[in-house]
Amino acid sequence: MDGLKETRFKSGFGYLHSLTNLSLLGSEDGFCDIEILYNDTFKHHPPALEYLNLSNCNIRCIEADAFSPLRTLQILDLSHNEDLGFQRLGLAVYGLQGSALHTLHINHIHFKYALCIFITKEDTVYFKNTSITSIYANYNSLQFFSPGALLNMPDSLEFVSLDGNHLGFGAYLEDLNNLQGLKQVRADGYTHHRKTPAHYRSEENECIHNAVEICRGNFSFCSSVTSSDRECYIFANGTDSRCRKQKTPWNVPDPVSGNTTYFVLPPYLTDFRSRQNQIYYRITRIDINSNNVLTRLDLSQNLLTALFGPVTGLNNLQYLDLSDNLANHISQTFFINFTSLQVLPIE
């Protein structure tokens, strides 16, 4: 169905005892225009519902208890609701705590050309009490996570897809080792061409809307949270706790000691892929915690210019793809520590 005329499920839905999959998704030119999911939207729901697709429905706000009745829900797709954003998504997860949800699709819930997109620990606070194993958050122009945001991810999380974002080096990388269950990460760049923007977005929907003063390093929500945001947030907390300025500015600690860069990987991460992501570095000395289990690393189709190394700690790495990079120099000692390597595409 291309949406619903009403924004609340009527009592008839409760009689659909055998219905497990429900798709209300619209299209770019479709008619799905739900905008707000209220706390009682799913009061009368198919009791065995496992799959719900609400993508492309112009959803802008989800009240905290909107998904609370859906205890059997396993897969939820909120993709292509570009005015939803991570703040209001974080509130929606409140109602998913303790449910059967294992897969969450949140692709393109921000304007494709937006600036200053980041995820705070307030946005992820309710994820901790879910059983989510897979998250697809592609094409959100995401640039970084604030410190502590990743610490709220559930221990059940095994797979993350972050294709088409703009993630860079930052302090959030120090939180990766706390993702105890994470096994696979996909973080490719844009693998297909984007359309030319058809309209301009106001500044409010970019930096100010996302409440970040990057240059100052302060996080302030009071001046930028819209009335609908404020209404949404108050359902979960009773007070608009986001209207406080963070006392300590966010400063990225220097991760480099001398000429060495240190990384600590999640303990069970086996597969990391970041292709076509315009990674523009010379690979110098890198030390990685030796108790990792990474077996596959794909950094192909990037802009790596030279491979000096050495890289230590990847003792279990079996597949390393560095093909289609710009590297015009490879040190004789670069591969000296890759003792388990079996496959090495370097065209």
Image (spheres, helix red, strand yellow):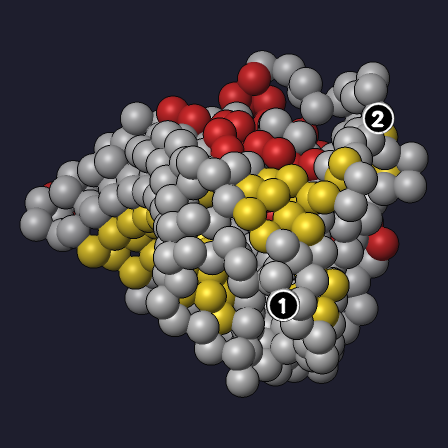
Q: Which of 102/51 is in front?
A: 102
Which amino acid does the dot numbered 1 rest on? Gln
Q: Residues within 10 Å of mark 2 (few under 14, many from 20)?
A: few
Q: Is residue 198 above or below residue 182?
A: below
Query: At which x and y percent is residue 333?
Result: 61, 62
Residue 7 appears in the figure: no
Helix, strand or loop for disc 1: loop
Q: Return the disc, 1 or 2, that comes first in the chain's sequence.
A: 2
- In the rendered image, is residue 197 in sight? yes
**Where is residue 211 shown, x and y percent of the image?**
78, 38
* Tag 2: amino acid: Pro
Mark in the foreground, 1 or 2: 1
* Farthest residue, direction top: 238
Q: Which residue is mark 2?
A: 249
Vertical comparison of 313 with 79: above or below: above
Nearest the viewer among 103 and 200 is 103
When the figure is inspected, residue 279 is found, relative to residue 35, above or below; the finding is below
Quadrant of image for the C terminus? bottom right
Q: Residue furthest bottom?
A: 347
Q: Quarter-wise, where is residue 9 in the image?
A: top left
Classify the position of the N terminus by image quarter. bottom left
Residue 132: x and y in percent read: 34, 39
Q: Residue at left 80%, top 68%? A: 200
Q: Which mark is residue 332?
A: 1
Q: Secondary structure at mark 2?
A: loop
Residue ID at (36%, 36%): 181
Report the Cα–Cα distance between label 1 and label 2: 43 Å
Q: Residues within 10 Å of mark 1 (few under 14, many from 20)?
A: few
- CB under 8 Å between discs 1 and 2: no
Q: Nearer the viewer, residue 18 or 139?
A: 139
User: Measured from the top left, where is residue 173 in percent x and y?
Assistant: 62, 40
